[in-house]
Amino acid sequence: MKRRLFLFASLASASPVAAQQPRAEAELIRLEQDYARALVNKDLAFLRSFYAPDWRGGNWLGFFTKSTLLKRLQGSRYVIKSMVVRDLRVRVLGNVAIVQGVDEEVTAMGDRNTSGTWGFTDIFARRGGRWVAIASQTTRIGGDR
């Protein structure tokens, strides 16, 4: 009887977390899609709220902080004509989430065409009742540039 009572208590206490999981996953997928649109539109207000103050990200150019990335996005050298995210996989681990996916983009850095298919991993933390990106990594999928 004690074992059944313990099992029931364990399941009952886990239910609210399990019920929140699909909602968090949907919210993070929407956030990634909104992020792609914000990059194309250079929506700096959205991007400032997307990244946590302590965010750090890396790609083929090196590592960036929130401020260095926003400066790059404000400049005219980095042009994002289109970006579509797909194959998103979300894992929510309490107040931390990992989102992995692929983006197809048409981009340029100065005179260099950087368009292509990129794999990414974004790590989010739930802070102040909302998800913010705390770390990111982007890697080219396919041929070298």
Image: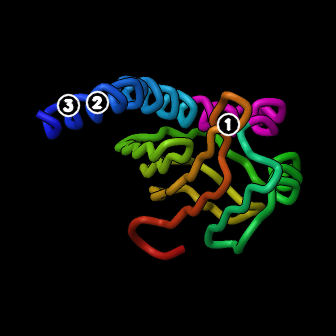
Disc 1 element: helix
Q: Position of residue 7 (x, y in %)?
A: 20, 36
Q: Is residue 60 left or right of residue 128?
A: left
Q: What whole-number distance in Å separates the C-alpha atoms at marks 3 and 2? A: 6 Å
Q: What whole-number distance in Å separates the C-alpha atoms at marks 3 and 1? A: 54 Å
Q: Is residue 80 above or below residue 109?
A: above
Q: Is residue 43 left or right of residue 21?
A: right
Residue drawn at x 63%, y 51% is 107
Looking at this view, is 141 or 65 the one in front?
Answer: 65
Residue drawn at x 80%, y 61% is 65
- The dominant secondary structure in magenta is helix
Is residue 48 covered in magenta?
Answer: yes
Residue drawn at x 61%, y 58% is 136
Mark 1 or mark 2, earlier in chain: 2
Q: Is residue 23 above or below residue 3?
A: above
Q: Which mark is residue 9?
A: 2
Disc 3 element: helix
Q: Is residue 134 left or right of residue 66?
A: left
**Which span is picked out in magenta?**
34-49
For the N terminus, the image quarter is top left
Instruction: Give the label, 1 or 2, closer to the camera.
Output: 2
Q: Which mark is residue 40?
A: 1
Which kind of residue does numbered mark 1 sit on?
Answer: Val
Q: What whole-number distance in Å separates the C-alpha atoms at marks 1 and 2? A: 48 Å
Q: Give yes or no for contact between labels 1 and 2 (Cβ–Cβ under 8 Å).
A: no
For disc 3, the marked residue is: 5
